[in-house]
Amino acid sequence: MSTVPPPERPDGEPSGESSSVISDEQLESFLREAAEGGGAPAPKEPSARARMVAARLREQDEAARRAQGGGRWPRRKRKVQGLPPGTPPGWRTGPAWQEMNGTRTRTRRRQIGSVIGVTLAVALAVVAVRPSLVLDRIPGREAEAAASPTPLPAETALPTSAPGQVDAALPTREHPFRGSPAERWADGADAIELPEAKAVAGLTEADVELALRNTKEFLVAGNMNPAVLRGEQPERALDLLEPKQSALLSELRRALREPTRKNDPLRLFTRFDPDEVRLAGDVIKVRGHMTFAASRPGELKVHADYTFVYPLVRAHGGGDQVARTIVRRDLTLTMADPGRWAATKGKLLPESYTADYSNSDCDAHDGYLHPAFPDDLLGPVPTGPAEDPYDRSRPLTDEARDVAACGVATRT
């Protein structure tokens, strides 16, 4: 007798009592217990529904592990590039990668900074040893060097010849000594360097040093003081002279107040008419030297021979023309010991003095120097011998200088 099989369900499984189908709840409970390591033995021949439920549970567990950072990917060493699609965002942007990347970047910057620092240090060392390697390549450096000639060493005695010729360039307000030997001379009071003092004629070294220092101050006060150059009274210079020689002081003050040809204050002091000219800048070029020697016991002689070069412009307008007036002074001052002589300590007495001026109106005797500018057409025509005002090789004495002659300056 044949047996008729039970009818099948729509899902393909038999529907009889002998079927091994279990419910969803039973299967879910079984799977959980199996995962925990215990529970009843697995049912035989699970159905398709069981397999679907098991698959769904595995997907849920996998998703839960991924959300908690678990799964297979973190346990595998992979390069950042070439990650498979669906890799969690933390792989590229998480804190660990950003920290590592920042560290590498900082290390690289430190290495580059070290290389740059070493290179810069070497470059600075080379420039310190040979600055011309850089300075000579600055645009206009050659022209600047040509405009600033090498200064001359200090003069200690009269030279043996006149200075050589220089380029016959016209002076300007920016370069008032251009085309003149004075470009290489020292500036202002610093050009008057004192010789080393030593005790002579019964005077101490300190006494000699005081005499030298006051002689320099007398020269500066009478020939470089801006107020005196503008025509004011040289009071500081007069204060340095021996007050007990009242006749000399009276004569000098009268010469400043009422100058004449015979009593000319320009023999000791340099003054310009402020209504005519003013200094072009604040630099006066100076060249000369100072010596000292013993005189009578308790008396010291200081000899000074200096040439001053004054760049000038017109006081009112007159364009950019610059004129130069050159004044050379040769004077001997004495200082005496008050314990031996009727003298005041530290005060100076002019024993002899003479002066020579170049580029000034010979017929003017008003106590001012009057320079001529290149475009001046009026004025007396010089008739005296031609002389180089920069020639310091010849002694300047009253006998050698004809005060009545109006010489021709070969250059200014």
Image (tube, helix red, strand yellow):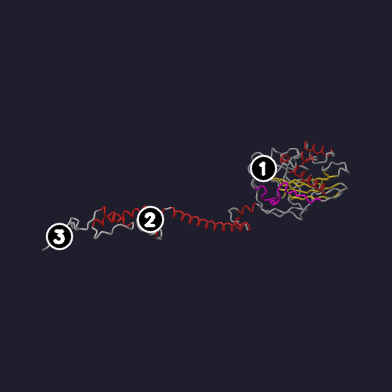
User: Looking at numbered disc 1 in the image, what kind of residue is underneath it?
Assistant: Val
Q: How far from the left and from the top, in percent, is residue 356?
A: 77, 46
Can residue 188 be found in the magenta stretch?
A: yes
From which residue to which does the magenta span run? 175-197
Q: How far from the left and from the top, in percent, is residue 216?
A: 77, 46
| Crowd band around label 2 with a 10 angstrom C-alpha radius: few (<14), some (14–19), many (20+) | few
| Crowd band around label 3 with a 10 angstrom C-alpha radius: few (<14), some (14–19), many (20+) | few
Work out whether mark 1 precedes mark 3 in sequence or the reverse, and give the earlier one. 3
Left or right of 141? Residue 23 is left
Residue in front for this viewpoint, 283 or 124:
124
Left or right of 14? Residue 206 is right
Work out whether mark 1 precedes mark 2 in sequence or the reverse, and give the earlier one. 2
Q: How far from the left and from the top, in percent, is residue 37?
A: 33, 58
Image mark count? 3
| Crowd band around label 1 with a 10 angstrom C-alpha radius: few (<14), some (14–19), many (20+) | many
Q: Which mark is residue 276?
A: none
Can residue 143 be found in the magenta stretch?
A: no
Residue in front for this viewpoint, 26 or 141:
26
Foreground mark, 1 or 3?
3
Residue at mark 1 to residue at mark 2: CA–CA distance: 94 Å
Q: Secondary structure at mark 3?
A: loop
User: Looking at numbered disc 3 in the image, what kind of residue is underneath it?
Assistant: Pro
Q: Which residue is mark 3?
A: 5
Q: Which mark is residue 70?
A: 2
Q: Secondary structure at mark 1?
A: strand
Tell me whether circle 3 and circle 2 mark residues in contact (CB < 8 Å).
no
- Residue drawn at x 61%, y 53% as measured from the top left: 141
- Residue drawn at x 86%, y 44% as measured from the top left: 337
Q: Secondary structure at mark 2?
A: loop
Residue in front for this viewpoint, 355 or 62:
62
Image-quadrant location for residue 262: top right
Q: Which residue is mark 1?
A: 313
